Image: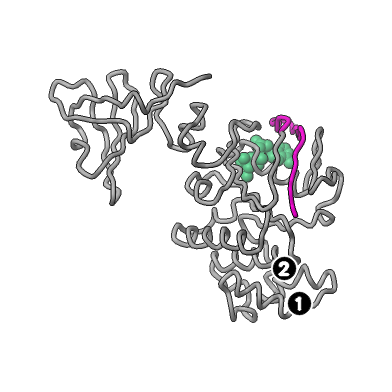
Amino acid sequence: MARIDLQGVARTYDDFALQPTTLSLPDRSFTVLLGPSGSGKSTLLRLVAGLERPDAGRILLNGRDVTEAPAEARGVGLVFQEGALFPHLDVAANVAFGLRVRGEPARERVEELLRLVGLEGFGKRRVARLSGGERQRVALARALAPRPAVVLYDEPLASLDRALREDLREALRRIHDEAGLTSVLVTHDRDEALALADRLVLMREGAVVEEGEPRALFRGPRTAFTARFLGAANVVDGWLVPPDAVRVEADPQGDARVVARRFAGFHEEARVRLASGQEIDARGPVGSFPAPGSPCRVAWDLARAKRLSA
Ligand code: ADP
Ligand code: MG
């Protein structure tokens, strides 16, 4: 069991304030903290980890108040953007580190973990010789070694190239499910967030803007910020218009103009400049959009547009 409750947790720095934040992260949930750089994601994660103390509020792990407990006492695994491995130790010794510290037998556990992260047989390699993706896998195995119920990730895939990122993303989700973890991951990458999260917590300027199940947030964003950040809808005159509800027709008399068109395999995307000068995104079957530069008329399906409440 590993449920995390934040009750009015706040932290102020000289130039930044994490607003009082209340969140309940259920046992075995995968929560993603998503937001632009500087929105306070890492601050919130460090508070949960115990690397930082809040100025106000309480943090509970399974109902136990850990607000003042040091990081080591929380039983939480941590994985950061750069694995911060011990370069002079081999892979096995890195993974075993947390076990040795506690005097626990390591050998079988290390082999099991290396299998879990797809690095079977890598035990004797020097970490200095590993690729970025392999290093992150080692960092993950090391964090999991002491069998934490909670694992916290801060942009663990940000330094990897795209193919590797998607690969490791799947590994993270699989390990989460298989080990029955409660995971919290920080990212500014919306694709990663949508792919991984059971619960998405969207942050902006030190505050939670919206939270919920990713599909629900994507389909029914309540704020213009959520709509834009998730790429879920255009915001036009106080309406939220999803790109796939936008129709674009070539028309020499039209007052709009296609400014870009992108073929994306199974579908096509276009960016269109309206008469007002605003640019919006459209998405449709291949062949839906006139060539860039074409004058056009734009319409959208009103039944699919939503009034912005705020
Ligand atoms: P994110 O992870 O969303 O990019 P952070 O939580 O790292 O954002 O940082 C939010 C803001 O708090 C930033 O403006 C950052 O400069 C500031 N900040 C973070 N840690 C500290 C600190 N230890 N001292 C002072 N300012 C900090
Ligand atoms: Mg950060």
Instruction: Name the spot of residue 195 as percent of width and height, x first.
Output: 50, 50
Q: Is residue 266 above or below residue 241?
A: below
Of helix, strand and loop, which one carries label 2? loop
Residue at image position (33%, 36%) is 244
Quarter of the image holding residue 285?
A: top left
Front one among 261 and 195: 195
Front one among 174 and 111: 174
Please tell me whether residue 16 belongs to the stretch shown in magenta: yes
Q: Are marks 2 and 1 in contact (CB under 8 Å)?
A: yes
Residue at image position (48%, 26%) is 224
Tell me where the magenta segment starts and ends, as one range.
Answer: 1-21
Q: Is residue 130 left or right of residue 231?
A: right
Cα separation between marks 2 and 1 = 9 Å
Amino acid type for the residue under numbered disc 1: Ala
Question: In the drawing, what numbered circle is on residue 106?
Answer: 1
Q: Which residue is mark 2?
A: 145
Amino acid type for the residue under numbered disc 2: Ala
Q: Is residue 219 left or right of residue 34?
A: left
Q: Earlier in the sequence, mark 2 or mark 1?
A: 1
Ligand 1, what quadrant? top right
Q: How is the image coloured?
A: one colour
Residue at image position (34%, 23%) is 302
Instruction: Name the spot of residue 208 as percent of width and height, x first.
Output: 63, 33
- What type of secondary structure mainly makes up the magenta span? strand
